[in-house]
Image (spheres, grey):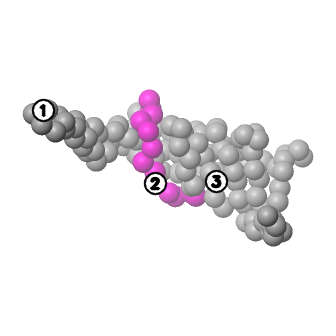
């Protein structure tokens, strides 16, 4: 079973037991966190796609630690002017461990098989 969640304007494919480095969350280390923006859930071949989110799905996770990402260096230079400027940036990240993906069958949900066959189109 896996799901696609959105946090920090990015999308992640997660399963139970995964560790993720995501944008910094205002939650202390060791505390649980719940993600409500679940875009897709695949439960043993039954795919539920949200519009835009799956209403009955949540993802439970524990905050492991807060870290800083690797340093990104931006270097600016203008030729023949003597202008050189170096700027560094380290992103603030939160490491979370996914505990479980919770879903409830809903009568109005869209469920399709995991493998979607598309008919060939002619141009």
Image point (58%, 58%), residue name:
15
- Which of the two marks, 3 or 1, is nearer to us in this view? 1
Image point (44%, 39%), residue name:
23
- Magenta residues span 15-27
Q: Secondary structure at mark 3?
A: strand
Q: Secondary structure at mark 2?
A: strand
Residue 24 inside the magenta-drawn segment? yes
Would you identify the image quadrant in which residue 35 lies? top right
- Mark with earlier residue (3, 2): 3
Marks 3 and 2: CB-CB under 8 Å?
A: no
Visible residue check, residue 60: no
> Alpha-carbon distance for marks 3 and 2?
14 Å
Q: Which residue is mark 1?
A: 81
Q: Foreground: 17 or 9?
A: 9
Residue 50 inside the magenta-drawn segment? no
> Alpha-carbon distance for marks 1 and 2?
47 Å
Visible residue check, residue 5: yes
Q: Foreground: 111 or 117?
A: 117
Q: Which residue is mark 3?
A: 3
> Alpha-carbon distance for marks 3 and 1?
52 Å
Q: The C terminus is located in which quarter? A: bottom right
Residue 84 against residue 119 in the figure, above or below: above
Q: Whole-percent x and y of residue 89? A: 27, 37
Marks 3 and 1: CB-CB under 8 Å?
A: no
Q: Whole-percent x and y of residue 58? A: 66, 43
Marks 1 and 2: CB-CB under 8 Å?
A: no
Q: Which residue is mark 2?
A: 19
């Amino acid at each position: 079973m896996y799901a696609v969640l959105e946090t920090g304007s990015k999308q992640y494919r997660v399963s139970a037991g995964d560790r993720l480095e995501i944008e910094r969350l205002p939650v202390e280390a060791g505390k649980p966190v719940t993600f409500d923006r679940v875009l897709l859930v695949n439960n043993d071949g039954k795919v539920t796609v949200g519009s835009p989110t799956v209403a009955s799905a949540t993802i439970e996770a524990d905050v492991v630690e807060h870290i800083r990402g690797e340093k990104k260096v931006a270097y600016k230079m203008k030729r023949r002017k003597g202008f050189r400027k170096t700027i560094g940036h380290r992103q603030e990240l939160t490491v979370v461990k996914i505990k479980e993906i919770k879903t409830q069958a809903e009568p109005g949900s869209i469920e399709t098989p995991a493998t979607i066959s598309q008919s060939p189109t002619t141009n």
